Amino acid sequence: MRSKETMTSFWNKTESPIIPVENTVDIVAPTHSDPKSNRPELEKLALDNLGALLRIWGKHAFDLDGIDAKTIHHQCDQWARHILVVAPHPDSAEKTLDQAELAANSQRDWQGLRKFATELRHREHTYVVRQFKDTRKMIGDFVQTLGKILAEDQEEQARVSIVLDHLRKTIETNTPLEVLSREAMQAINVISEIAEERNQRHRHMFEDLTTRLQTLRGELNAARHEMELDPLTRLFNRKALNEQLGRVFELSKLSGQPACLLMLDADHFKTVNDQFGHPVGDLVLKQLADCCLYTFPRKSDFVARYGGEEFVVVLQETNQKTALALAERLLQGIRALRIAHDQGVLSITISIGVADIGEYASASAWLQAADDALYQAKRNGRNRVECRPA
């Protein structure tokens, strides 16, 4: 038979024997003086090496389509045992050899082994080629998608397009995987540089935006403060007074700290406007406002123009006795005030009403008490201080 002739031709070769690899026993090669007499030893040496190769193949197997590495390892081990000791091989249950074939091949299924090795190698080749193809496509798609995401302007898009075109050509020319990986890393490095540049640009934009927001916040605060000021005297206006009065009232009620209100009015102010004109009247109001600020310099003191020639001072943590003393000092300061204008010099007086927070139920009731004290001072002759009992 042809297979027997092939085996005989193989055994008659006199080349150096193959050295066994792992999982084999060291065998001393026989002398070559008489090839025919050494045939059994050569045959045993060849079988040992073939069995070792099958086991190495199985040991380093990997998952393939339709079969996992563990199964491949087991089948290679079965074929190795079949070759070495003529044990049943994986296909023995499915194939029955002809008695003549078994006798001719020393009961070893060489055709089955060849079929097994061919099919396994074909599966490995198919799997590896597909994996390489998929890996190439995945690398290309990943880098291209990454570039599209990170490129924002035309200049960045141009830089990304250059590296992507080069990478695409590398993929299409079936370049070795290590070269493809190197090209992909170069593309990623370029994209990383673009990303870092963009991050720096965004950081600078954020810092600039933060500065602009801070400036805008300052402008808004200034505008808000400006809205709370009386344009003539630069004191707080009535709207700001109402808000501050409510805060101080609630805080004093909660903390139990004393607080007082002063409401004052320029005496005979209408006469000033009628005799000297409104510009002089405005000058008088400004001088009166400056004198109030000088008399109540604490940060917690709140001085506001209530309307016309009326002013209100909110004094936190101030009892009635202290408030009366401060009101008298303001009264004396206004009496000593001399206001120069185009038509000469004039002096004014004021009337002041004082109200302690006491047991008033609301901020408006407290303010009304100060207003009542002011009109009491007006009725009692002006140029004086009156206190509203709590």
Image (tube, rainbow, N blue to C red):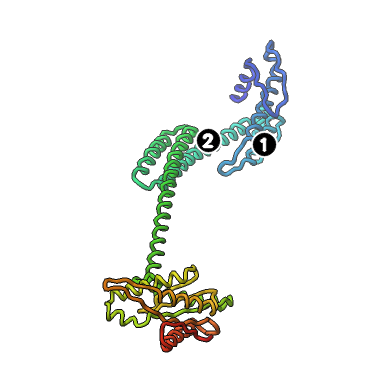
Categorize mark 1 by other alpha carbons within 10 Å: few (<14), some (14-19), many (20+).
many
* Image x and y of residue 357, in percent: 53, 81
Residue type at mark 1 is His
Q: Position of residue 111 (x, y in %)?
A: 60, 31
Mark 2 or mark 1, whichever is nearer to me:
2
**Residue depicted at x 58% and y 34%:** 115
Residue 187 percent coordinates (x, y): 44, 38
State left or right for residue 91 relative to residue 270: right
Q: Is residue 75 visible?
A: yes
Above or below, 309 against 58 in this view is below
Q: Which residue is mark 2?
A: 125
Report x, y in % for residue 366.
Answer: 49, 83
Callout 2: 10 Å neighbours few (<14), some, many (20+)?
few
The mark nearer the N terminus, 2 or 1, is 1
Q: Is residue 142 left or right of residue 28?
A: left
Task: Look at the numbered disc 1 and give the secondary structure of its residue.
Answer: loop
Element at label 2: helix
- Residue nearer the viewer, 227 or 141: 227
Amino acid type, residue under disc 2 in the picture: His
Which of the pair 166/24 is nearer the observer?
166
- Rendered image quadrant of residue 106: top right
Question: Which label was assigned to residue 89?
Answer: 1
- Who's the residue at 31% across and 82% down the image? 271
Residue 238 visible in this rendered orientation of the protein: no
Is residue 278 toward the left or the right of residue 141 in the image?
left
Q: Is residue 382 above or below residue 102?
A: below
